[in-house]
Structure formats: C-alpha cells, structure tokens
Image (tube, grey):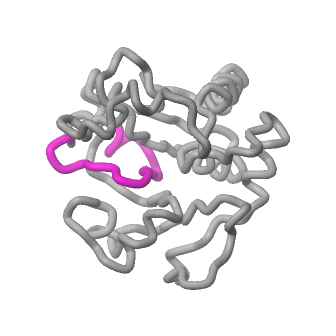
Amino acid sequence: MKVILVGNGSSVVDYKMGEYIDSEFDLVYRINRFKTEGFEKYVGSRVDGWFLADTGVQWLHNPTPMVEGSTRVNEFEYVFICMPKFKHNPNGLPLTETIQLLPTDIEDKINDNIDLNPQWPTSGLIAIQFLLNNYNEIFIHGFDNQNDKYKYTHYFDEGDEDRLTENWRKPRTDHNFNKEKEYLNLLRKEKKVIDIV
C-alpha cells in the first residue's frame, strides 16, 4: 500500500506534483484547512482521508466553503480527529464509522521518541505517527516546518497577516516546531518517512 500525507506548507507551490499525487498513491491524506481548488497542479485533488484537529470539529457541525474538507467530508473514506491527550474526550464529537477520534497512545509514542511536554504534537505529526503505526513507510509533501524562505506558513494563506511565517516561529505554548522538526528528520533518516521531492 502506497500512502501519502499532503501537508499545508508553502513549499508545495514550488513543485507541480498534483497529477503525481492523484495517480501514484493508493491513499491520499490531507490535514486541517487543506485546499485543492485552485491548487490542483501543485497538490492534486484526491482526498481519501482527512486528519482534523479537535479545534476544527466545528467545521463538521457547520460546514463552510472556507474549509474545503467540511464541504467534501461525505466523499472521504476516513476522517480522523486529532485531540491532545490532556483534553481527550469523545463527548460532543460527531463520531461515526467514518469519523473517528484517534487514541492517546499516538501522542505517547511521539513523546517516547521526543518529549514535547508540556506542549503537544501538531495534527501533522499525529497524522504521521498514526500512519506509521499502520504502514512501514509513508510519503509526505508540504512539510517545511514554517521555513523562513516562505512569507506565509501555509500555501493558501496569502494576504492573511495572522498566518505570516515570522509570527508562527515565535515561542508558542501549544506546539514545539523545533522538536517536531527534529523528530521528523529522524524518521526521514530511518526511511520511514519519504519526501516526494
């Protein structure tokens, strides 16, 4: 099974990988506020599964054109909700056979390798760890860890001053991007995670 997780980093627009993503993989996963419309030549359009932060569950209850996944969710085979361990609770979630809450042992596995406490993993790192629990290797695209080369942190953020990369690189109480980058690079070195470019 050949699996890809397409991230939302601005680096995706450096490469026209859309056709390759749509045609070469058995499963294509995306994260949070992904956009394919208007970006198909860079990221493709297929979505087999969607990893969604718990803060985005509102979009399942109230779909909005601003969040493509919320209006296409009925097309997806899988929707995985990523909720930090400290607030892990299924109450109020629209869980179905398709929409599932990921277990806390995924966060534990990450912390066994690189201790993020008292912060917690991003949806992207949770998605990577979950997929590695199920597949020997995964392919990724668009994981550039808020690289200063790019003005905006996500490829679809142009014009949104709240999403400037420089703002996202400031110390945060929720995520530690430097430690996540370190762990991701270790997974790359071990050939468990493979960049498509």
Quadrant assignment, res 39: top left
The location of residue 184, given as percent across then percent down, is 64, 29
Q: Nearer the viewer, residue 101 or 40?
A: 101
The residue under the point 69% across, 41% down is 136
Whether residue 159 is in magenta: the answer is no
Residue 19 appears in the rendering? no
Q: Name the side, left or right, on which 25 lies relative to 190.
A: left
Q: Nearer the viewer, residue 143 or 153?
A: 153
Residue 60 appears in the rendering? yes
Q: Nearer the viewer, residue 184 or 134?
A: 184
- Residue 48's place in the image compared with 190, above or below, is below
The residue under the point 58% across, 73% down is 100
Q: Name the side, left or right, on which 86 lies relative to 39.
A: right
* Residue with the most extreme left position: 38
* Chain part drawn in magenta: 19-39
The location of residue 7, given as percent across then percent down, is 43, 40
* Residue with the most extreme top position: 149
Q: Name the side, left or right, on which 39 lies relative to 174.
A: left
The location of residue 16, given as percent across then percent down, is 25, 28
The C terminus lies in which quarter of the figure?
A: top left
Whether residue 30 is in magenta: the answer is yes
The residue under the point 74% across, 39% down is 116
- Residue 68's place in the image compared with 8, above or below, is below
* Residue with the most extreme right position: 112
- Residue 8's place in the image compared with 70, above or below, is above
The residue under the point 43% across, 21% down is 147
The location of residue 150, given as percent across then percent down, is 32, 21
Quadrant assignment, res 62: bottom left
Q: Name the side, left or right, on which 164 lies relative to 121.
A: left
- Residue 127's place in the image compared with 18, above or below, is below
